[in-house]
Amino acid sequence: MNETVPPISGYPPQPKTSGLAIWSLVLGVLGIICCSILCAVPGVICGHKALSKIKHSGGALTGEGLAIAGLVTGYIGILLAVILIPIAVIPNFVKAFDRARDKAMRIECINKLRDIEAAKNQWASEKGKKNGDVPTAQDLRPYFKNGVFPTCPAAGTYTIGAIGNAPTCSIPSHSQAGGPASPYVKMILYKPKDACALIGNKTVMAGDNVQGFTIVAIGTNSVTVKSPTGVKKELRLGDVLK
Protein backbone atom coordinates (compact mmCIF):
# COMPACT_ATOMS: atom_id res chain seq x y z
CA MET A 1 0.00 0.00 0.00
CA ASN A 2 1.39 3.33 -1.04
CA GLU A 3 1.35 6.31 1.51
CA THR A 4 0.35 9.57 -0.07
CA VAL A 5 1.84 12.79 1.26
CA PRO A 6 -0.80 15.38 1.93
CA PRO A 7 -0.39 18.57 -0.07
CA ILE A 8 1.13 21.54 1.74
CA SER A 9 -1.59 24.03 2.47
CA GLY A 10 -1.13 27.84 2.70
CA TYR A 11 1.88 30.02 1.86
CA PRO A 12 5.12 30.63 3.74
CA PRO A 13 5.05 33.84 5.83
CA GLN A 14 6.24 36.92 3.95
CA PRO A 15 9.25 38.73 5.43
CA LYS A 16 8.42 41.99 7.20
CA THR A 17 10.29 45.27 6.93
CA SER A 18 12.00 46.11 10.21
CA GLY A 19 10.33 49.03 11.96
CA LEU A 20 13.67 49.95 13.55
CA ALA A 21 15.22 50.22 10.08
CA ILE A 22 12.48 52.64 9.01
CA TRP A 23 12.90 54.73 12.18
CA SER A 24 16.66 54.74 11.70
CA LEU A 25 16.33 56.31 8.25
CA VAL A 26 13.68 58.81 9.36
CA LEU A 27 15.72 59.97 12.37
CA GLY A 28 18.94 60.06 10.34
CA VAL A 29 17.37 62.33 7.71
CA LEU A 30 15.96 64.60 10.44
CA GLY A 31 19.42 64.71 12.03
CA ILE A 32 20.86 66.08 8.77
CA ILE A 33 18.06 68.55 8.12
CA CYS A 34 18.00 69.90 11.68
CA CYS A 35 21.71 69.32 12.48
CA SER A 36 20.35 67.75 15.65
CA ILE A 37 22.21 65.18 17.73
CA LEU A 38 18.87 64.45 19.40
CA CYS A 39 17.68 62.93 16.12
CA ALA A 40 20.95 61.63 14.69
CA VAL A 41 22.08 59.59 17.71
CA PRO A 42 18.77 57.70 18.10
CA GLY A 43 18.88 57.10 14.34
CA VAL A 44 22.30 55.44 14.62
CA ILE A 45 21.14 53.34 17.58
CA CYS A 46 18.03 52.20 15.71
CA GLY A 47 20.15 51.35 12.66
CA HIS A 48 22.52 49.10 14.59
CA LYS A 49 19.67 47.37 16.40
CA ALA A 50 17.78 46.88 13.12
CA LEU A 51 20.79 45.26 11.41
CA SER A 52 21.29 42.93 14.36
CA LYS A 53 17.62 41.85 14.41
CA ILE A 54 17.53 41.37 10.63
CA LYS A 55 20.70 39.25 10.75
CA HIS A 56 19.28 36.94 13.42
CA SER A 57 15.69 36.81 12.09
CA GLY A 58 16.33 33.98 9.66
CA GLY A 59 14.82 35.93 6.78
CA ALA A 60 11.70 36.99 8.70
CA LEU A 61 12.82 40.62 8.65
CA THR A 62 14.04 42.78 5.80
CA GLY A 63 15.14 46.41 5.55
CA GLU A 64 18.90 46.05 5.68
CA GLY A 65 19.27 48.80 3.08
CA LEU A 66 17.04 51.14 5.10
CA ALA A 67 19.08 50.46 8.26
CA ILE A 68 22.37 51.13 6.46
CA ALA A 69 20.96 54.35 4.99
CA GLY A 70 19.81 55.34 8.47
CA LEU A 71 23.29 54.71 9.87
CA VAL A 72 24.93 56.78 7.15
CA THR A 73 22.54 59.73 7.52
CA GLY A 74 22.71 59.46 11.32
CA TYR A 75 26.51 59.65 11.42
CA ILE A 76 26.46 62.54 8.94
CA GLY A 77 23.93 64.33 11.18
CA ILE A 78 26.19 63.84 14.21
CA LEU A 79 29.19 65.16 12.28
CA LEU A 80 27.28 68.24 11.10
CA ALA A 81 26.02 68.93 14.62
CA VAL A 82 29.52 68.64 16.09
CA ILE A 83 30.88 71.08 13.48
CA LEU A 84 28.03 73.55 13.00
CA ILE A 85 26.64 73.91 16.54
CA PRO A 86 29.91 75.30 17.99
CA ILE A 87 30.25 77.62 14.98
CA ALA A 88 26.79 79.03 15.73
CA VAL A 89 27.03 79.04 19.52
CA ILE A 90 30.59 80.20 20.25
CA PRO A 91 30.24 83.71 18.69
CA ASN A 92 27.07 84.33 20.70
CA PHE A 93 28.77 83.06 23.85
CA VAL A 94 31.75 85.34 23.24
CA LYS A 95 29.46 88.34 22.70
CA ALA A 96 27.53 87.59 25.90
CA PHE A 97 30.79 87.20 27.82
CA ASP A 98 32.11 90.51 26.45
CA ARG A 99 28.89 92.31 27.41
CA ALA A 100 28.98 90.87 30.93
CA ARG A 101 32.67 91.76 31.31
CA ASP A 102 32.12 95.32 30.03
CA LYS A 103 29.18 95.80 32.39
CA ALA A 104 31.18 94.53 35.36
CA MET A 105 34.09 96.85 34.51
CA ARG A 106 31.71 99.79 34.07
CA ILE A 107 30.17 99.19 37.49
CA GLU A 108 33.61 98.83 39.08
CA CYS A 109 34.78 102.03 37.38
CA ILE A 110 31.74 103.99 38.56
CA ASN A 111 32.34 102.81 42.12
CA LYS A 112 35.94 103.97 41.89
CA LEU A 113 34.82 107.37 40.60
CA ARG A 114 32.56 107.63 43.63
CA ASP A 115 35.50 106.78 45.88
CA ILE A 116 37.53 109.53 44.22
CA GLU A 117 34.74 112.05 44.75
CA ALA A 118 34.39 111.03 48.41
CA ALA A 119 38.17 111.47 48.81
CA LYS A 120 37.97 114.91 47.17
CA ASN A 121 35.28 116.05 49.55
CA GLN A 122 37.14 114.71 52.56
CA TRP A 123 40.32 116.43 51.37
CA ALA A 124 38.42 119.69 50.89
CA SER A 125 36.91 119.45 54.37
CA GLU A 126 40.21 118.72 56.09
CA LYS A 127 42.26 121.26 54.11
CA GLY A 128 39.63 124.03 54.09
CA LYS A 129 39.33 124.00 50.30
CA LYS A 130 36.39 125.43 48.35
CA ASN A 131 34.58 124.75 45.08
CA GLY A 132 36.94 125.27 42.18
CA ASP A 133 40.04 124.02 43.99
CA VAL A 134 41.63 121.08 42.19
CA PRO A 135 43.36 118.29 44.15
CA THR A 136 46.03 116.06 42.62
CA ALA A 137 46.23 112.29 42.80
CA GLN A 138 49.05 112.73 45.31
CA ASP A 139 46.75 114.87 47.50
CA LEU A 140 44.10 112.15 47.53
CA ARG A 141 46.27 109.06 48.03
CA PRO A 142 46.10 109.21 51.86
CA TYR A 143 42.33 108.69 51.64
CA PHE A 144 42.61 105.37 49.81
CA LYS A 145 43.55 101.96 51.13
CA ASN A 146 47.34 101.51 51.21
CA GLY A 147 47.65 104.95 49.62
CA VAL A 148 46.92 103.55 46.15
CA PHE A 149 44.98 105.88 43.83
CA PRO A 150 42.21 104.01 41.91
CA THR A 151 42.62 103.08 38.25
CA CYS A 152 40.00 102.22 35.65
CA PRO A 153 39.66 98.42 35.17
CA ALA A 154 39.32 99.00 31.42
CA ALA A 155 42.51 101.09 31.20
CA GLY A 156 40.65 104.41 30.99
CA THR A 157 42.14 107.65 32.31
CA TYR A 158 40.62 109.45 35.28
CA THR A 159 40.22 113.21 35.45
CA ILE A 160 39.90 114.25 39.09
CA GLY A 161 38.37 117.65 38.39
CA ALA A 162 37.72 120.53 40.73
CA ILE A 163 35.83 120.40 43.99
CA GLY A 164 32.14 120.62 43.10
CA ASN A 165 32.62 118.75 39.83
CA ALA A 166 32.39 114.98 39.55
CA PRO A 167 35.51 113.06 38.46
CA THR A 168 35.28 111.46 35.04
CA CYS A 169 36.71 108.56 33.06
CA SER A 170 38.00 108.82 29.50
CA ILE A 171 35.76 105.89 28.50
CA PRO A 172 32.37 107.51 27.70
CA SER A 173 30.25 104.61 28.94
CA HIS A 174 31.93 104.78 32.35
CA SER A 175 29.94 107.81 33.44
CA GLN A 176 28.38 108.00 36.86
CA ALA A 177 24.98 108.60 35.35
CA GLY A 178 23.29 107.22 32.29
CA GLY A 179 20.33 109.42 33.20
CA PRO A 180 19.40 111.39 36.30
CA ALA A 181 21.67 109.95 38.98
CA SER A 182 20.42 108.91 42.39
CA PRO A 183 22.34 110.78 45.10
CA TYR A 184 24.76 108.76 47.16
CA VAL A 185 26.70 109.24 50.37
CA LYS A 186 29.83 111.20 49.48
CA MET A 187 31.12 112.11 52.91
CA ILE A 188 30.31 111.68 56.62
CA LEU A 189 31.53 114.15 59.25
CA TYR A 190 30.70 112.81 62.68
CA LYS A 191 30.69 114.94 65.78
CA PRO A 192 28.78 113.96 68.93
CA LYS A 193 26.56 117.02 68.78
CA ASP A 194 26.95 118.26 65.22
CA ALA A 195 27.16 115.30 62.79
CA CYS A 196 26.49 115.91 59.11
CA ALA A 197 26.84 114.10 55.80
CA LEU A 198 27.12 115.00 52.15
CA ILE A 199 24.49 113.14 50.11
CA GLY A 200 24.60 114.07 46.47
CA ASN A 201 25.37 117.79 46.52
CA LYS A 202 23.44 118.45 49.71
CA THR A 203 24.85 118.66 53.22
CA VAL A 204 22.34 117.12 55.62
CA MET A 205 21.85 116.61 59.33
CA ALA A 206 19.50 114.41 61.33
CA GLY A 207 15.88 115.36 60.58
CA ASP A 208 16.58 116.68 57.07
CA ASN A 209 14.86 115.31 53.98
CA VAL A 210 16.49 114.23 50.70
CA GLN A 211 14.23 113.19 47.81
CA GLY A 212 11.58 111.91 50.22
CA PHE A 213 14.07 110.14 52.51
CA THR A 214 14.32 111.36 56.10
CA ILE A 215 17.74 111.43 57.74
CA VAL A 216 17.19 109.58 61.02
CA ALA A 217 20.73 109.52 62.42
CA ILE A 218 24.34 110.06 61.39
CA GLY A 219 27.00 107.79 62.88
CA THR A 220 30.75 107.59 62.55
CA ASN A 221 30.61 105.43 59.40
CA SER A 222 26.99 105.36 58.30
CA VAL A 223 23.82 107.33 57.79
CA THR A 224 20.45 105.91 58.83
CA VAL A 225 17.57 107.01 56.60
CA LYS A 226 13.85 106.29 56.45
CA SER A 227 12.22 105.81 53.05
CA PRO A 228 8.88 107.36 52.04
CA THR A 229 7.28 103.99 52.88
CA GLY A 230 8.73 104.02 56.39
CA VAL A 231 11.50 101.48 55.81
CA LYS A 232 14.77 102.27 57.59
CA LYS A 233 18.13 101.47 56.02
CA GLU A 234 21.75 102.14 56.81
CA LEU A 235 23.93 103.79 54.15
CA ARG A 236 27.71 103.87 54.07
CA LEU A 237 30.11 105.85 51.89
CA GLY A 238 29.30 105.25 48.24
CA ASP A 239 25.85 103.77 48.90
CA VAL A 240 23.07 105.13 46.70
CA LEU A 241 19.95 106.67 48.18
CA LYS A 242 17.17 104.58 46.64
Image (spheres, helix red, strand yellow):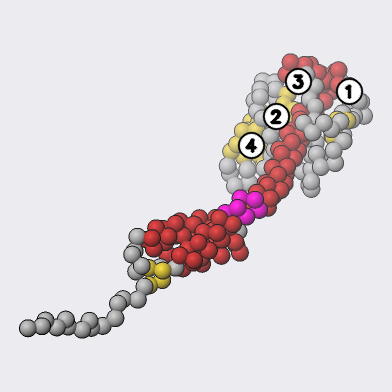
Q: Earlier in the sequence, mark 4 or mark 2?
A: 4
Residue marked by disc 4: 225
Q: Which mark, by number, is residue 237?
A: 2
Label 4: which secondary element: strand
Q: Are marks 4 and 2 in contact (CB under 8 Å)?
A: no
**Residue beneath label 1, please?**
135
Q: Which residue is mark 3?
A: 144
Q: Judge from the rendering whether residue 46 lies leftward or rightward of residue 165; answer left or right.
A: left
Residue 107 horizontal/vertical position (percent) = 73, 37
Q: Is residue 196 visible?
A: no
**Frontmost residue, 118 versus 202:** 118
User: Would you call the spot at circle 4 few (<14 residues within 10 Å), some (14-19), or many (20 or more)?
Assistant: many
Q: Secondary structure at mark 2?
A: loop
Image location of residue 67, percent across then percent down? 47, 63
Q: Position of residue 220 (x, y in %)?
A: 66, 22
Q: Which residues are magenta?
A: 78-84
- Choose the circle earlier in sequence order: 2 or 1: 1
Element type at mark 3: loop
Q: Quadrant of the N terminus?
A: bottom left
Residue type beneath disc 4: Val
Name the kind of residue labelled 3 in the image: Phe
Q: Earlier in the sequence, mark 1 or mark 4?
A: 1
